[in-house]
Image (cartoon, rainbow, N blue to C red):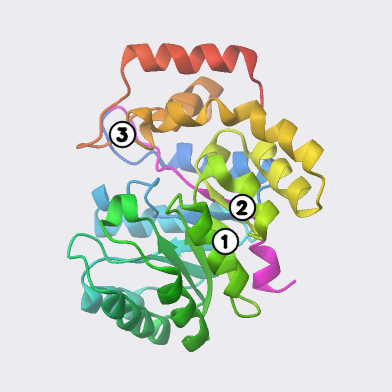
Amino acid sequence: MSLLNKLKGTGVALVTPFTKNHEVDYNGLTNLVKHVIKGKCEYVVVLGTTGESVTLSKEEKLAVTNTVIKAAKGKVPVVLGVGGNNTNEVLHSLKTTDFTGIDAILSVSPSYNKPSQAGIVEHFKLVAKASPVPVILYNVPGRTGSNMSPATTLKIARECKNVIAIKEASGNVEQVMSIIQNAPDNFLVISGDDGITLPLVAAGAVGVISVVANAYPLACSSMVRSALKNDFVKSRKFHYGFYGLIPMLFEEGNPAGVKVVLKQLGVCGDDVRMPLVKVSKDLEKRIHTYMKYYKG
């Protein structure tokens, strides 16, 4: 099966579990990878936003990546987050990283310095040329401070053969549909928002890179697979099962919310690293209440 086909379905934006002393919990991470593979998710993403990658040292990033590769045992593709707002630094990372066991990279649009659309295009042209594995673009304007327009995404997709997909997390359904409608052949559009994955798949997206799937991998992957088969009656049942939980998972910051669920499920702990903090007792109670009635 080609990589493009393997990326159709549910990818999991893996959290990075921590101990109470805020050290990386590698046993918890191994448990998590096994948990999502058992839940029939199609691939995993390591060192993304949900993985709190910006708070990990270089040594920890390497150890986390190797732990995920080892735990996955080749059963699912592994996508590595490699991005930043210093283009030369990103290129250096691509040059010096060992990509053994890595199937693709997820590369976020530069944040904070707010490049023009032309700057975003030139950045990704260099990334695509330097990457030894296929590139998945990542547009998340709520975090980066700038939006990749459909025209920008499509220009990169057409001019960079090594760019195979985009994780679109703008939350703008019309924007995502514009990309889907005009995308070149063999360019995948992947939802970056759990709450609108179902309508986006109905519109032509090929799946999701999900936060919720950390906790409920089988429900999420079943929803997407059903939608891809045009069985929207079945897909809606899965979708609305966890739909009410989604706002709570992001209410006080991601991944603090989903880690509450993971702790309750016995997968890993709920500790996060500063500047993130655990959710409030009120939110924790509401999440636990939801979980009493929803079993995934």
Give the camera-side residue of 180 and 255: 180
For the question of whether residue 246 can be seen, the reply is: yes
Q: Which residue is mark 1?
A: 177
Q: Are marks 2 and 1 in contact (CB under 8 Å)?
A: yes
- Mark 3: amino acid: Val
* Residue at x-position 36% and y-position 73%: 97
Residue 144 pos. (x, y %): 28, 57
Residue 256 pos. (x, y %): 36, 31
Q: Is residue 21 above or below residue 65?
A: above
Q: Is residue 145 above or below residue 84?
A: above
Give the camera-side residue of 250 and 6: 250
Q: Which element is circle 3 on? A: loop
- Mark 1: amino acid: Met
Sequence-wise first label, 2 or 1: 1
Q: CA distance from mark 1 to mark 3?
A: 35 Å
Q: How many marks?
A: 3
Q: Which element is circle 2 on? A: helix
The residue mark sitting in front, 1 or 3, is 1
Q: Residues within 10 Å of mark 3 (few under 14, many from 20)?
A: many
Q: Which residue is mark 2?
A: 200
Q: Quadrant of residue 141?
A: bottom left
The residue mark sitting in front, 2 or 3, is 2
- Mark 2: amino acid: Leu
Q: Which residue is mark 3?
A: 272
Horizontally, residue 269 falls left or right of residue 204, namely left
The residue mark sitting in front, 2 or 1, is 1
Q: CA distance from mark 2 to mark 1?
A: 8 Å
Give the magenta-colored segment's residue range: 1-20
Q: Quadrant of residue 190?
A: bottom right
